[in-house]
Image (cartoon, rainbow, N blue to C red):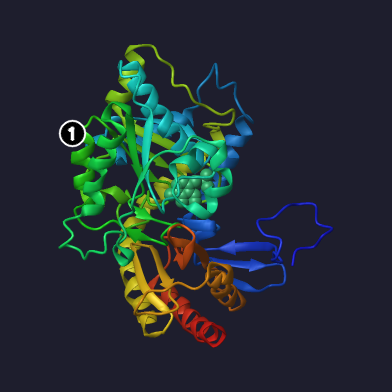
Amino acid sequence: MSNPNEVAVQRRWDWHYPIVARAEGIYLWDTEGKRYIDGSGGSSVVTSIGHGVKEVPAAMARAAEAYSFYPAHAFSNPKLLELADLIAEIAPGDMRHNCKVWMTVTGSEATDDAARLARQYWVVKGKPSKHIILGRWQAFHGDNIFAVSMSGLTARRRMFTPMFRDMPKIPPAFCYRCYFEQTYPRCQLLCARVLEDAICQSGPENIAAFIAEPVVGSALACAPAPDGYFQIIREICDKYDVLFIVDEVMTALGRTGKMWGIEHWGVTPDIIATAKGLTGGYFPVAAVIARNDLWETLRANNAHFRAGHTLNASVIGMAAAVETIQYVLKHNLVENARTVGAYFLEQLKGLRQYRTIGDVRGLGMMVGFEFVADKETKATFPPEREVSRLFSELTFERGLVTYPCAGTVRGVAGDTILMAPPLVTTKAQIDEIMPILHESMRAFEALV
Ligand SMILES: Cc1ncc(COP(=O)(O)O)c(C=O)c1O
């Protein structure tokens, strides 16, 4: 339990939070000297380049020594320009050297700003009725109120629904619990085609954009969309003049074994929201990347982008992001995430031997598994038992940080574990993680 005299409010009251003393690579040590493997890459999918990389804090210190913050309404900073150029060099598909980049601070702000950009673009283009951002159930796009309205994770949104105008949603692309009770590929990707119905029902003249994660993180603990899914989404968006926003807050910069998650489907979105791995956790930085012609529409009309937070594009954050991306490129971490991630997934499949493991899934170094009370029926454990949390506590005791999630069934039940160790993880380190998972599974099944 938390200490009632502690003034700082932590995420949960029913947990005693050890203090992190130091970290190196994929390891963390608490003040008692106990070592943990950062198996979820922070909370979660953040620590891409690992802990203790000297180049990043050194670049941040150099930036901080120059000035604290700058009057951003009147000046720019060199690291912002350098970072935007660097992102344009590695942007996916048709966006490469054909985009502009807007910086912000958190992933929630990035998805919110992506939605603002879609809206403003249509208003400036003379289609002011386009205002709806279509989303998907069992998706998570952030915790500010508009991001929650686009997100479909019921347990996290229910309390706040009276406070926002809800955005319509289609079912997720989730083969393990297919909403249409079909099997891939016989399903002919109904989960993608249904987007057309949703657009027509609300009226294409009202839809500004569709938003989706290429691999669903915490809401479905790492479910990649099936092959062909985003190609259909792209076609439908084009047919109805709907922008496609890809939420790459978790999946960007190598996490899934390609620089961008969406590259697995070979389509180019109109707008990308990204954050987390952009600085590997060394500083909060997020970005909205959009095709040049969207921004040009605003620029040609001298329509300044109606978004912005005071601390956007801090020179310290920009320096951290430049250094992090360069580190990813220099150390071939995209390739490492692909090969070590594939090895990790193979090893994780061994967990299927346990009676309570229903599915193992993922892409690159973004993987997960789902607990079931009954393998045949895929019945979930009662949500109030919080079995994913129980499992996570068991791995934590054994020195492995895992990230417990829930909500694969209607956003309220269905327990999963998300694993996303830093992209620098080696196969030998996966071999350290696996015995802890097996031991924790045995302890878990003795309890449930
Ligand atoms: C896919 C996705 N989008 C957006 C967000 C929001 O990012 P942040 O927590 O930095 O606001 C998250 C956070 O977990 C996320 O996983």
Question: Is residue 82 among what the camera can see?
Answer: no
Q: Is mark 1 within 8 Å of ligand 1?
A: no
Residue at the disc numbered 1: 239
Is residue 241 found left or right of 407 in the rendered image? Answer: left
**Front one among 86 and 263:** 263
Task: Determine the image quadrant of residue 427.
Answer: bottom left
Q: Residue at x 28, y 63 (%)?
A: 175
**Front one among 357 and 284:** 357
Give the percent coordinates (x, y) of residue 168: 38, 40
Count up the numbered dots: 1
In the displayed orientation, state which residue is furthest to the front.
201
Q: Residue at x 51, y 85 (%)?
A: 445
Is residue 180 found left or right of 186 in the rendered image? Answer: right
Q: Amino acid at mark 1?
A: Lys
Give the percent coordinates (x, y) of residue 112: 47, 35
Give the percent coordinates (x, y) of residue 341: 35, 66
Q: Residue at x 34, y 64 (%)?
A: 362
